[in-house]
Image (spheres, helix red, strand yellow):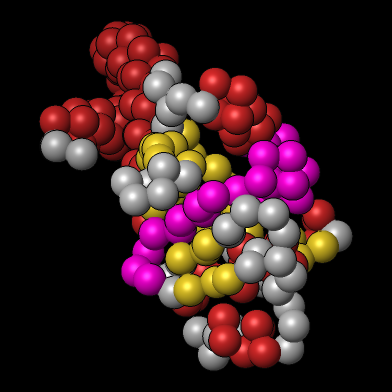
Amino acid sequence: MADVERPAKLMKRGAFVRFPGDYVFALADHRLLAIEDDPGAGRSIASDLKHVSVKGDVLNITGYDEEEFLRRGLPSMAWDTQELENIGKSFEHLCRTGSTENLPCYEAKFRRKDGRPFWLRFDRLSQTPKTGRHMTIMHDVTTEVELREARQAREAAEKACADLSREVQAKLVPTIGMLERIKEKAPLLSDDVDAILEANRTVTGFAQEMLKKGSADAARPP
């Protein structure tokens, strides 16, 4: 994206300061701006980093100072309070035990400067083979999350249509028999009854089609 500043440019203007530990961000270029600046936190997370490099779609944070990182690092990027709590708990566990066992994977929602959201999945917390320092690896799962939410919205809409169709059928089908009997007993009302019957059949037919479509959609693989 054109409005994203390159890491080298950010470093050249003195956007990064050194803290204890060796912080390394490696994230796809188009994600960098969103992570470096969180308006809600009132500060730039880039100022907490010694170095930023661009490498694929994976974010690596390595060798952090426990208190400094927890106070000024990753949690300041979290958008949602619950997500912030999950992040904090994971790092608290890591700092307290030095172990990455039993740390759950979870997704966290972030935002770009223009307000558009994106999601990162915290896939694992481990140690680097060479230095033994702690490392967090996250993956951009925005597309996956958006597709999942779209599928859930579609399924909810299909269920609502199916419920409505059943309700329509339950109310209209019995009236068709009643109208047929009225037509037999009052031939003069035959034309009016036929018009009502036709309208009822149209509505119930539409309801049946909606139910068939919902069943067919439900049978399709996700």
Residue occupying the far right of the picture: 42
Res. 5 in view: yes
Q: Is residue 40 magenta?
A: no
Q: Would you place residue 13 above or below residue 135 in this image?
A: below
Q: Residue 199: percent from the left, percent from the top? A: 35, 35
What residue appears at the point 63 percent right and 68 percent down from the top-left corner? Answer: 50
Q: Would you place residue 109 above or below residue 198 in this image?
A: below
Given residues 187 and 34, the one toward you in this image is 34
Question: In the figure, is residue 93 to the left or right of 121?
Answer: right
Q: What stretch is highlighted in magenta?
A: 55-84
Q: Residue 193: percent from the left, percent from the top? A: 35, 26
| Residue 104 figure quarter | top left
Question: In the figure, is residue 91 to the left or right of 146?
Answer: right
Given residues 124 and 111, the one toward you in this image is 124
Q: Would you place residue 114 above or below residue 215 in this image?
A: below
- The C terminus sits in image quarter: top left
Question: In the figure, is residue 182 to the left or right of 25?
Answer: left
Res. 191 in view: no
Question: In the figure, is residue 46 to the left or right of 213?
Answer: right
What residue appears at the point 32 percent right and 46 percent down from the top-left corner? Answer: 129
Q: Is residue 75 magenta?
A: yes
What residue appears at the point 62 percent right and 89 percent down from the top-left corner? Answer: 9
Given residues 76 and 193, the one toward you in this image is 76
Q: Residue 103: percent from the left, percent from the top? A: 45, 25
| Residue 70 figure quarter | top right
What residue appears at the point 57 percent right and 86 percent down from the top-left corner? Answer: 8
